[in-house]
């Protein structure tokens, strides 16, 4: 038979173990989220550096046009600072790219569906206003979503497959010109 003191000690020990277990779980979750934030910061910084290099704009020049200090912009590019949406918009303006592009890189906006090259081509077209780009991207994304749900992905035969009568690639199938 347990004494009341032994019972209480056992309960306290059980509660401490449970708290330690939960604290470890919470610490793991916080560490994982911190790592994810750090990764996003570094991706945004790398993207900004790549865009700056491609535009042949110096760090000092971009900092001036974005209205931030050189050290701050350098820290953003190295993933040490997380810029606000306003700073991202100013950087985007200095790089002459859409703010939406940087917002996606920073995880503020969800990425658009579709081919990234097509999305990039629309965004980089200097002849389109930001409004026109947004409308085109919305239309393109809608088309991609609808097309993905209504048409199955065509299955191509292996390269060593010999087409049967009536299959695409069968030389006996009449062409539009001969039909």
Image: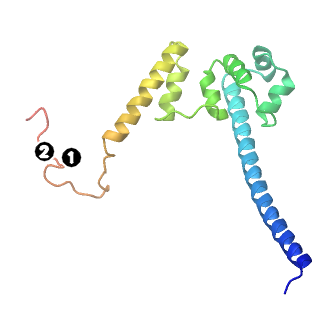
Q: Quadrant of residue 39?
A: top right
Question: At 70% from the left edge and 17% from the top edge, which residue is drawn?
Answer: 94
Scheme of image coloration: rainbow
Graded by Cα atoms within 10 Å as few (under 14), some (14 to 19) or many (20 or more), the crowding at tag 2 reads some
Quadrant assignment for the N terminus: bottom right
Q: Which residue is mark 2?
A: 173
Is 63 positioned to the left or the right of 55 in the image? right
Question: At 84% from the left edge and 26% from the top edge, which residue is drawn?
Answer: 72
Q: Position of residue 141 (x, y in %)?
A: 44, 30
Quadrant assignment for the C terminus: top left
Q: Quadrant of residue 56?
A: top right
* Element on which disc 1 rests: loop
Residue 1's place in the image compared with 52, above or below, is below
Residue 88's place in the image compared with 23, above or below, is above
Graded by Cα atoms within 10 Å as few (under 14), some (14 to 19) or many (20 or more), the crowding at tag 1 reads few
Say which of 33 and 46 sits in front: 33
Q: Position of residue 46 (x, y in %)?
A: 71, 35
Q: Calculate the distance from the C-alpha at mark 2 to the C-alpha at mark 1.
A: 8 Å
Say which of 132 and 53 sits in front: 132
Say which of 164 and 82 sits in front: 82
Residue 161's place in the image compared with 122, above or below, is below
Q: On residue 176, which mark appears?
A: none
Is 160 positioned to the left or the right of 9 in the image? left
Question: At 87% from the left edge and 73% from the top edge, which residue is drawn?
Answer: 8
Of all residues, the one furthest to the bottom in this rendering is 1
Question: At 13% from the left edge and 52% from the top edge, which residue is drawn?
Answer: 165
Mark 2 and mark 1 in contact? Answer it, CB < 8 Å: yes
Q: Position of residue 99 (x, y in %)?
A: 63, 22
Q: Which residue is mark 1?
A: 168
* Element on which disc 2 rests: loop
Mark earlier in primary sequence (2, 1): 1
């Amino acid at each position: 038979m347990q004494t009341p003191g032994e019972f209480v000690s056992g309960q306290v020990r059980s509660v401490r173990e449970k708290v330690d277990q939960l604290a470890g779980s919470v610490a793991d979750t916080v560490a994982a989220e911190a790592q994810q934030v750090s990764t996003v910061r570094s991706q945004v910084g790398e993207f900004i550096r790549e865009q700056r290099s491609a535009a042949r704009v110096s760090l000092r020049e971009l900092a001036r046009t974005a209205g931030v200090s050189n050290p701050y912009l350098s820290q953003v590019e190295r993933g040490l600072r997380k810029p606000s949406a306003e700073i991202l918009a100013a950087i985007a303006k200095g790089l002459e790219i859409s703010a939406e592009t940087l917002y996606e890189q920073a995880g503020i906006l969800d990425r658009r569906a579709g081919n990234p090259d097509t999305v990039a081509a629309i965004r980089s077209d200097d002849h389109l206003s930001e409004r026109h780009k947004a409308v085109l991207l919305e239309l393109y994304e809608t088309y991609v979503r609808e097309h993905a749900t209504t048409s199955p992905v065509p299955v191509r035969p292996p390269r060593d497959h010999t087409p049967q009568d009536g299959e695409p690639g069968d030389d006996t199938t009449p062409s539009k010109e001969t039909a």
